């Protein structure tokens, strides 16, 4: 599979302009379907005080709004840098069909954006992670899933 240089250049330009404008970090993304840009996004973490406002997440939100769908089937995402674990998961949940990226994780780490610790944390058992994760009220929590299974007309995803 081959990507389109113009879409990657757009993602990189978004990332660079985002830094120069002072809005956020050096990450930009473009979502394309059928050779047409559906949406773009740039990192807005510090501008919005939202730790989830990475360039890819912003682009996914914008594309889903534009397409009035929670799935981006048939779409490709071009991102200025290899997606972090959160963005990668969001890309999979959105059902994008391809990821094209410019910089790699090592490039991001060299600029101060090192997500290697997240990959390591995910490999650890829950009781060995830095942030404690404690299961509480599982007997009650199951009721949400029971309600979901019983719901007529639910939209599976």
Image (cartoon, rainbow, N blue to C red):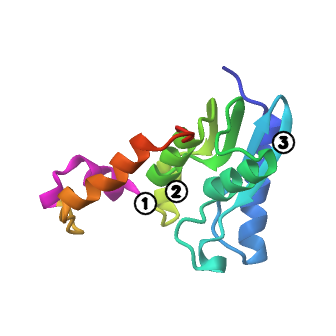
User: Which span is picked out in magenta?
Assistant: 115-128
Magenta highlight on residue 30: no
Residue shown at the point (41%, 42%) measured from the top left: 150
Residue 55, percent from left and from top: 65, 58
Above or below, 43 against 101 in this view is below
Does dot 2 land on a helix, a strand or a loop? helix
Sequence-first disc among 1 and 3: 3
Distance Cα–Cα, label 2 vs label 1? 6 Å
Image quadrant assignment for residue 129: bottom left
Label pair 2/1, CB-CB below 8 angstroms? yes
Q: Which residue is mark 1?
A: 114
The answer to whether residue 131 is left or right of residue 4 is left
How many other residues sit within 10 Å of disc 2, few (<14), some (14-19) or many (≥20)? some
Query: Residue drawn at (62%, 41%), measured in percent from left and top?
Result: 101
Q: What residue did someone put label 2 on?
A: 108
Farthest-out residue, top: 1
132 sits to left or right of 94? left
Residue behind mark 3? 37
Chain-order first, disc 3 or disc 2: 3
Secondary structure found at label 1: loop
């Amino acid at each position: 599979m081959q990507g389109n240089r113009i879409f990657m250049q757009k993602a990189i330009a978004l990332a660079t302009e985002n830094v120069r404008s002072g809005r956020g970090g050096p990450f930009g993304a473009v979502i394309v379907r059928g050779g047409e840009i559906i949406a773009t996004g740039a990192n807005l973490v510090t501008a919005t005080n939202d730790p989830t406002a990475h360039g890819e997440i912003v682009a996914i939100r914008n594309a889903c709004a534009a397409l009035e769908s929670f799935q981006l089937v048939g779409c490709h995402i071009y991102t200025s840098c290899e997606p972090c674990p959160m963005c990668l998961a969001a890309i999979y949940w959105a059902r994008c069909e391809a990821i094209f990226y410019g910089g790699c994780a090592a490039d991001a780490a060299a600029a101060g954006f090192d997500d290697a610790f997240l990959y390591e944390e995910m490999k650890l058992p829950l009781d060995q992670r830095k942030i404690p994760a404690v299961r509480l009220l599982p007997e009650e929590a199951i009721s949400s899933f029971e309600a979901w299974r019983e719901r007529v007309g639910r939209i599976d995803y």
